[in-house]
Amino acid sequence: MKRILIIGSTGQIGSELSWKLRSIYGESNVICGYFAPPFPEGFFEAGQTVKIDATDINQVADAVKKYQIDTIYNLAAILSATAEKNPQLGWDVGIGSLMNCLDVAREYHCAVFTPSSIGAFGSNTPHKNTPQDTIQRPNTVYGITKVAGELISDYYYERWGVDTRSVRYPGLISNLTLPGGGTTDYAVEIFYKAVKNEKFVCPLRAGTFMDMMYMPDALDAAIQIMEADPAKLKHRNSFNITAMSFDPERLYAEIKRHIPGFVMEYDIDPLKQAIADSWPDNMDDSCARIEWGWNPKYNLEAMTKDMIAILKKKMAVGNECYF
Ligand code: NAD
Ligand code: AKB
């Protein structure tokens, strides 16, 4: 049985991954590291928690020793749009936390999962059917941390035998915790506006295609890659994975099939638009499919139906809607 530490467990991914990992590996085997508010509802009651600033190696090492951890899910990061406003912080959290996890993992024999992103690609990467192995010259600090993270994770595997594995997540759409300041956040925010019957102002231009994924598939990916047979992995850090690709117009049209009166307008955010323009339109994820059986369940139609149903239910019981 695994003993898991999640670093950054209160964010968009961690708040859902913690429930899923507990349901698979047992409540007492999953320790949720937290850094700063906001905390998901019931976070401190749901299981074991520990405060960790992952940029401090002693805090990571103390938690690994105390809880006899053998697997670290390292989710600490500053997402793309926020990191552009504070590059030093983006670097310190993205790379500082990863280096600490890798060094602690090397000493205490842990496996490490650290997500990469579509942000690991740049303007001169082929944008259509982006290959697994291709040019990676991003021009955002977030993307630079992701490329450096992929390389140093492979280095720790090859040089020291640390079992590092990763996926390049696309934009993630979910309904529990709001996204943390990325370029793809619009694809979540639009749903909150739609179910509240409010107008949505889209920060990206029509025709801006990016890969996207519904959170249940993203959680499955994180677990499947860490459970994959190592003998079958030709790649490790990191695998292209995707579930759908759309632009704001296509998403708007799909939501309007459920909420016909919904209105969307555009007010382009130049920073987010420049970042989105540098990212792939759609990635080729065939290596993940072949090497560890990646096979997402949700396409645009299924994700949209589920998002609207869940958010409407939340609103009906009077829960807070934040946008
Ligand atoms: P998020 O911003 O929602 O959460 C990040 C978490 O890191 C938060 O809980 C925050 O408190 C924590 N954190 C910040 N500084 C810390 C520190 N010094 N020590 C410990 N924890 C710290 O991010 P997320 O969306 O959950 O993303 C998790 C990972 O997945 C990141 O590596 C991100 O780059 C990657 N990713 C996310 C998406 C997406 O669409 N959400 C897409 C691609 C990749
Ligand atoms: C962001 O937009 O920064 C993230 C990502 C795709 O990495 N959602």
Image (cartoon, helix red, strand yellow):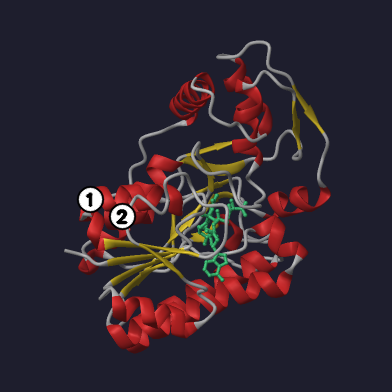
Given the image, on which type of amino acid does mark 2 rest?
Ile
In the image, taking residue 181 as reference, residue 13 lies left or right, namely: left
> Would you say residue 156 is visible in this rendering?
no
Q: Which residue is nearer to you in this view: 82 or 202?
A: 82
Q: Do residues under tags 2 and 1 come within 8 Å of each other at their CB atoms?
A: yes
Classify mark 2: residues with Cα within 10 Å, few (<14), some (14-19) or many (20+). some
Q: Which residue is nearer to you in this view: 220 or 53?
A: 53
In the image, taking residue 87 as reference, residue 196 lies left or right, namely: left
Q: Residue at x 50, y 57 (%)?
A: 131
Q: Please report whichever mark, 2 or 1, sits nearer to the chain's N-terminal start.
A: 1
Q: Which residue is mark 2?
A: 223
Q: Residue at x 38, y 51 (%)?
A: 17
Query: Relative to residue 73, is residue 189 depicted above or below?
Result: above
- Horizontal and vertical percent for residue 110? 29, 76
The quarter of the picture where residue 94 lies is bottom right
Given the image, on which type of amino acid does mark 1 rest?
Ile
- Horizontal and vertical percent for residue 139? 71, 66
Q: Residue at x 24, y 67 (%)?
A: 3
Q: Which residue is nearer to you in this view: 274 or 271?
A: 271
Mark 2 sits near ligand 1, with its Cβ under 8 Å away:
no
Disc sitting over residue 263 in the figure? none
Disc sitting over residue 24 in the figure? 1
* Quarter of the figure with the C terminus: top right
> Would you say residue 188 is visible in this rendering?
yes
* Quarter of the figure with the N terminus: bottom left
Query: Relative to residue 246, is residue 11 depicted above or below?
Result: below
Q: Nearer the viewer, mark 2 or mark 1?
A: 1
Query: Relative to residue 178, is residue 323 depicted above or below?
Result: above
Q: Which residue is nearer to you in this view: 176 or 80?
A: 176
- Horizontal and vertical percent for residue 253? 63, 20
**Distance from Cα at disc 2 to Cα at disc 1:** 10 Å
Dot 1 falls on a residue whose secondary structure is helix
